[in-house]
Amino acid sequence: MALTRVNPTRMELTKLKKRLQIARRGHKLLKDKRDELMKQFMAVVKENMELRLKVEEKLQGLHSGFYLAAASTSPKILEESLIYPKMKSRLEVGTKNMMSVNVPTFSFDSKSIENGDIYSYGFTFTDSRLDEALGNLGDILPDLLKLAEVEKTAQMLAAEIERTRRRVNALEYIMIPDYQENIKYITMKLDENERGNITRLMKVKDMMIAQQFQTKQ
Amino acid sequence: MEQNRSYLVAVIGDRDSVLGFRAVGFDVHFAEEPQDAGILLKKLVRDGKYAIIYITEPLFTVLSELIETYRDLTLPAIIVIPSVSENSGVGIRRIQNSVERAVGADILFKE
């Protein structure tokens, strides 16, 4: 580790020791945070996985249903049937604090789904398969929403974990060893000075004694 | 971010895949070409009206770089859905990606 030039003084030493202590405490706290985040993240990811598989499977079925319906209805009529939807999906977005990460929560605005009727057309010109497909779509709507919420949460937690992990590592492998090294350097320098002082004193004392001895003779 | 404001849901994709979402009141935007979709997506994100933007897989694959830049925003949540013609597991891979990012290693999907 490259030694940063520090003044080998007692003041600097005290300062560094204090910093080291703070760094250690920060390291411990961040490590705890990381562990807890990880725990929650694993739960979220598991849910995310299950939801995604479920939604994808259902959507697949839906697509084929819709495709069939579209095939048996003329595109114009199909377009027309869906041109003015009966409901407008509005979402209430709140935030939930998850380990100081603000994750969004989505819920349907209650006004938008008063009745289960989503068919925006008369049944005269359209295929019953269309009704079916749209009905299915209405059914998976809550799952679709939940998926968005969970997936976003997972992504945000992942980002936060990454950040925290970086900080932990920076403290553990760079900051703390750096401080330790500097502290060691200063202590050694100070000790060295101390020893120098003592030898000097001893030498001076010897010289003084020798001088006194000479004058006595 | 404002609490409990009312937001909309958008869907971007090819006509066949997303037309049906109109019935449930999502804002459906058609885009067959990736460039159009990119411009559209940027516009939708900038708008700030949308909490969730669903995007079909083929478009997502092409636009993944752009979408990556929105990853750390709280809103909107950009979510992949399979299209009529394609379901190659991009969504699953995205989860995998999150895990890798968090843990530093792939621990869920070891094969």
Image: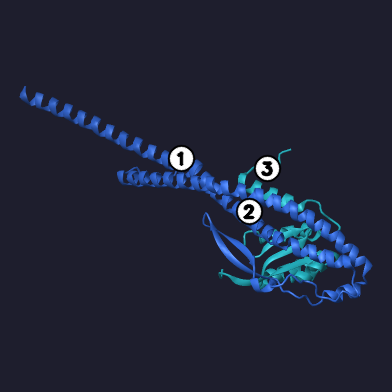
Foreground label between 3 and 1: 3
Q: Name the residue located 5 percent from the left edge and 24 percent from the top edge.
A: A216
Looking at the rendered structure, the secondary structure element under dot 2 is: helix
| Chain for disc number 3 | B
Q: Which residue is mark 3?
A: B108
State whether residue B16 is above or below residue B93: below
Give the mark toward the camera: 2 or 1. Answer: 2
Could you tell me how far apart the alpha carbons at marks 2 and 3 are, in whole angstroms?
14 Å
Read off the residue under disc 1: A177
Judge if badges 3 and 1 mark residues of a common chain: no
Kindly indicate which chain is depicted in cyan in the rendered structure: B
Q: Nearer the viewer, residue A139 or A7?
A: A139
Taking the view exactly as shown, the residue that stands out farthest to the top is: A217
What percent of the width, then of the height, locates residue A213? 10, 24
In this view of the protein, which residue sits in the foreground, A84 or A24? A84
| Residue underneath mark 2 | A154
On the rendered image, what quadrant is the C terminus of chain A found in?
top left
The structure residue drawn at horizontal position 27% and vertical position 35%, both measured from the top left corner, is A194
Chain coloured blue here? A
Question: How far from the left and from the top, in percent, is residue B52?
Answer: 68, 65
Q: What x and y, as percent, mark residue B42?
A: 71, 68
Residue at horizontal 46 percent and vertical 45 percent from the top? A27
